[in-house]
Amino acid sequence: MPDNKIELETDGHEVVEGAAGRGISQKSFSQAVTDVGAGSMLGYRLEQQAVLSNFGMEALKSSSVPSLLDRAAETAALGMRASLSKILEFRKTENDLLIRAGVGWRAGVVGVVSFGADVESPAGYAFHTGSPVISNHLEGEQQFRTPQLMIDHGVRRAINVLITYGGGRWGILEVDSSSAGEFEAADLAFLQGLANFIGVALDRQVAEDRLSAALEYQKILVQEASHRVKNSLTILSGLLRMKARSSTTVEAAEALGSASDRVIAVAHTHDRLWRDAGSEMIDLAALLTEVCGTLAQQLDHVDIRASAEPSEVSPDQAASFALLLTELVTNAAKHAYSAEGGVIHVRLTRRDGKRVLEVSDEGVGFAPDFSIARSGQASLGMRLIQTLTQSLGGTIEIASGSGAAFFVRF
């Protein structure tokens, strides 16, 4: 779980080290973590998937191992809302785990301090067995010894996962926290996903050092990384959907169901990235068909009728489009019809040099005083629709007649 309060072991101005030995302000890092720290548990899980997806794309473009590890350490801390993280590389000759990158540690730690790689330490155990380790109460830990560095920084709980590459073991990704609370299985899934991306990126770096013509290999890595993200997000969507079915309140069920829909939309985007690996553009018509097909299975009380003209956009635009489409369709399914259901029309066309996404229904229509701006103040879904439309550089209009219709031009 996220820290309820971020506690830093230094004053607000001490300098800590990044992966490449460069300093970053503890005060700046604290502010970044605090900014991310607002929101509900549901928002927290969605934030984790967002930062994981963003890091995956960055990792595939990285040309420097130190900067890659530095960014990974920052992503781990932000994604877990923790003040401390570190990446440990196994050194066979010394039989230890060296801190190659980290966030939140005092100067003189990163690149210098190492831990024994034996199974008596949490990191060493995770490295040798391949099993992740969650230690939620280090002050009472009996199975493992707690390194002095962590004691000095007031660490109360830690979570370790293995980083692999090339079929072997590279090191450990660890997040530490000085606050009370507990890390959960969902946190473990996020951290292992991040570790998998690090391993994929390290694979690419090694391959590019050995091969002068690495374009085909890079294509394979893009496929594998996007495929992994798609599978992870699909699993997460299923878990959210299962939780929605067992929820005791309608509000919780709707919130979890909406979250599941949003996650699966991102999953479909990554599926397109996997299938179109090597291409700089994504086929929107195929993406629209896939998203609507999945939504039709989840929203079984409505009949979604989709059509799309061929159109291609960048991967970033495709992700925004998939999320926007999901929000518009689920909004129509929720507000247009009762339990008996009805029809939702989805069309993607080109008019006057612009793409036009139309989502309409044959339901009750808009309330007389409805406006997107006013609804956005109270509805997360409508705020997302506005934000995603802006991210596409588009505009949105509504029309009411025999039902309601949204028109997004971008």
Image (spheres, helix red, strand yellow):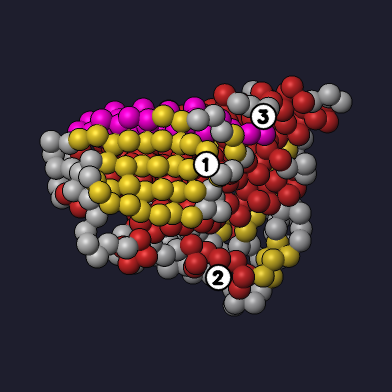
Residue that badge 2 annotates? 31
Residue 376 place in picture, x, y as percent: 35, 62
Q: Nearer the viewer, residue 135 or 254?
A: 254
Q: Say few, some or many: other residues with alpha carbon within 10 Å of mark 3 (under 14 / 14 to 19 / 20 or more).
A: few
Q: CA distance from mark 3 to mark 2?
A: 38 Å
Q: Residues within 10 Å of mark 1 (few under 14, many from 20)?
A: few
Q: Amino acid at mark 1?
A: Arg
Return the disc, 1 or 3, that comes first in the chain's sequence: 3
Would residue 142 be found to the left or right of residue 153 on screen?
left
* 3D distance between C-alphas at marks 2 and 1: 45 Å
**Residue range corresponding to the magenta coloring:** 279-306
Q: Using a 10 Å C-alpha cutoff, classify the residue at mark 2 as few (fewer than 14 neighbours), some (14 to 19) or many (20 or more).
A: some
Mark whose residue sits in front, 3 or 2: 3
Q: Which mark is residue 207?
A: none
- In the rendered image, residue 337, in percent from the top left (x then y), is placed at 18, 43
In the image, 63 versus 295, the foreground residue is: 295
Q: Earlier in the sequence, mark 2 or mark 1?
A: 2
